[in-house]
Image (cartoon, rainbow, N blue to C red):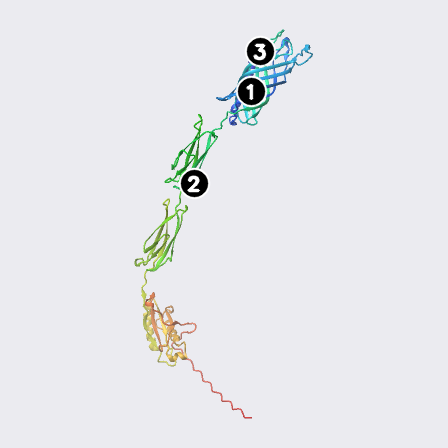
Amino acid sequence: MSFRISVVPRRTDLMLIVLAFAVGLFPAYVSAQSPVQPVDEVFGGYSWLHPNGYGDLNYKIDDIPRGFDISNTYYLPGAHNLGVLIDGSGHFHGSTTPINPLNNGTTGTSVGYILGGLQYKYHTGTLSPFVRAFVGTASLSPDCCGGTRWNVAAGAGGGLDLAIGSRFALRVLQYDFIYSNYNQTFLSSHSTQWDSSRLAGGVVFNLGEYYNPPLSCTASASPAEVWSGDPVTVNTTGTNFNPKHTVTYGWTANGGKLSAANAQSATVDTAGMAPGSYSANATITDPKMKKMNSATCPAPFTIKQPQPPVVSCSANPATIAIGESSTITMTASDPQGWPMTYTWSATGGQLSGSGSTVTLTAINTDAGNTITVTGTATDERASLSANCTAVVNVPPIQKCVNIEDWGECTFEKDRKRPWRVDNECRDVLDKLSLRLQQMPNGKLDIVGYTDEKEVVKEQTLGGQRSVNVKYYLTTEGSTKVDGSRVTPRQAGTKGKATHFYFVPEGTLCGGQLEEGTVVDETQVQGQPRKAPAPKKKAKAKAKPAAPPAANP
C-alpha cells in the first residue's frame, strides 16, 4: 500500500473557495448567536460521492449516489467551538465507464472512509456554519479489476446546520474534499489520485452542554419616590447563580446612608438629601466561581421636590371702627400633607389668638387707616413657607353734631286762616332763609304744632302750617331756599306754632332724634300767603216733626 497525492491547482483553488465561503458565513450570523454549546455532537445521514478517479484498464469510476455518513465531534472544554472529529462514510453499488463486461454489467464499485481531524463550528440558535480538516484511510474497490485497495486519505470541508432546538439540528449541507490514491494493478494511462467530492445531509444530535448563562441580577427600591427624610428599602435577586453555592451581597449608593452593605436587602436613610435621582447598586458574588462570578444591578429611586403650602386669608368684617374687632382666617393646605405652623403680623391694631385664626382689634391710632394683616404657614418637614394677606379698613373718627333751635312762628292772629304765614312770621322767615344759605351743610326741619282745641277739629293743621312755611321759603320769600334742604314735619299739641330746627350733617350726639314725623306733601300741599279762607258750609234746616198718628 502506498500513498501519493499530487498537487492539483484546480482542486486546491476550489477547496479554498469553499473554505472561504464557510468562514465568510461567520459575521453574517454573529447577531444570531445563542447560548448553544454542546459537549458532543453526533451526525448521521445520507451521502453522495463523486470519486473523480480511475481504476485498472482506464475504467472511470462513476458518481455513487448510494451512501451514508456518520460522524462524532467532541468539543474541547476550553474552546467550545473547536472539536475533535471522527468521521466514517460508506458508498455502494457504484458503476464504471465503460461497464466491466466481465461482471455482466453489475454495479460493484464501493468506497469507504475512516477519517479523523478537527472541526470548528460557530454555534448559533439558527444557522451554524462549520469547517473541518481531517486525515485517515480510504477503502477503494472499483468494479474492475485489481480489487480493493486501502490507502491514506486527507481532506477538508465545511457545511451549515439549521438548529431546531438546543438538542437537535438539521445538516442542510456538508461538502468535503477527500484526496486518496488507487494504485492500479493493470495498465492504466490515468493518475492514481482520486480527488473525491462528498456531499452529505442529515440529522445532528447535541449531547451535553457547555453553556453557562451569564450571571445577572435585578434590584428594586420601595417606594421608588420619597420625600427627603423618608426611608427607602432596596432589595436584589440574582439569576443563573448556582443554588447550591452561598453568594455574598454588597451595596453602594450615590446618596444617603445604607443601613447594611452586605445583605440582600438594605435601607437607605435619605435625611438631608436634595431632590433628584439616585441609585443604590447591588453586587451579588459567587465566591466558588473562578471567572465572571458576579453581577451588578441598580435600584433607582427619586427624592421628590417638595412644594410650599397653598394659603389664602380673609377678614370678617372687612371694616371696623375703633374698639371693634375683625376675625382673620387663614385657609392653608400642604401638598405633601405635612403639619404646618402659623405666624401672624399686622401693620396696626392689636392681634390676639394663634393657629389659623386670629382676632384684630382697632385702636385709636388706626382711625382713618388701612390695616394689612399677614399670615405665614410653614410646613414642619421642609420649612417651606407661603404668605397671604387680609385688609381691614378703619374709618376716621366722626364728630357728633347737635340739632340747633332756630326759633318759631306763631299762628295766633288770623283766626280765619290759622295756617297762614302772616307778616310777623314773614319777617322771621326772611331772616331764617339768609341764615340757612350761610350754612351750606345741613337741613332745616319745620315742625308744625296745634293746640288742644284745634286737633279735635283738624288733624292735619300742624302739617299744613309746616308745608305753608316751606312754600314761603322756597317760592314767595325774597331769598329762595332749595326745597331739598327743607323738610316739613308735624308733631304734637304745643300751641299754634311752627318751630325751626337746623340739623347739621353728621351723627347726632347723645342719641338726639328729629322731632315729629315727615308730612306727606302729596296729601298736604303748601299754600301761598294770599290764599282765601275756605267758606263755611250752611247749616241744614231741621225738618218739622211728623204729626202724631191719629188714634183709632
Disc with the residue nearer the chain's start (3 vs 2): 3
Which residue does the numbered mark 2 point to in the structure image?
Answer: 225
Mark 1 residue type = Asn
| Relative side of 338 to 140, left or right | left
Which residue does the numbered mark 3 point to in the structure image?
Answer: 151
Mark 3 residue type = Asn
Residue 10 visible somewhere in the drawing: no
Disc with the residue nearer the chain's start (2 vs 1): 1
Against 491, residue 358 (above or below) is above
Which image quadrant: the N terminus?
A: top right
Residue 248 x, y percent position in the rendering: 42, 31
The crowd level at tag 3 (other Cα within 10 Å; few <14, some 14-19, many 20+) is many
Q: Secondary structure at mark 2?
A: strand
Residue 340 x, y percent position in the rendering: 37, 48
Residue 348 x, y percent position in the rendering: 32, 55
Q: In front: 326, or 229?
A: 229
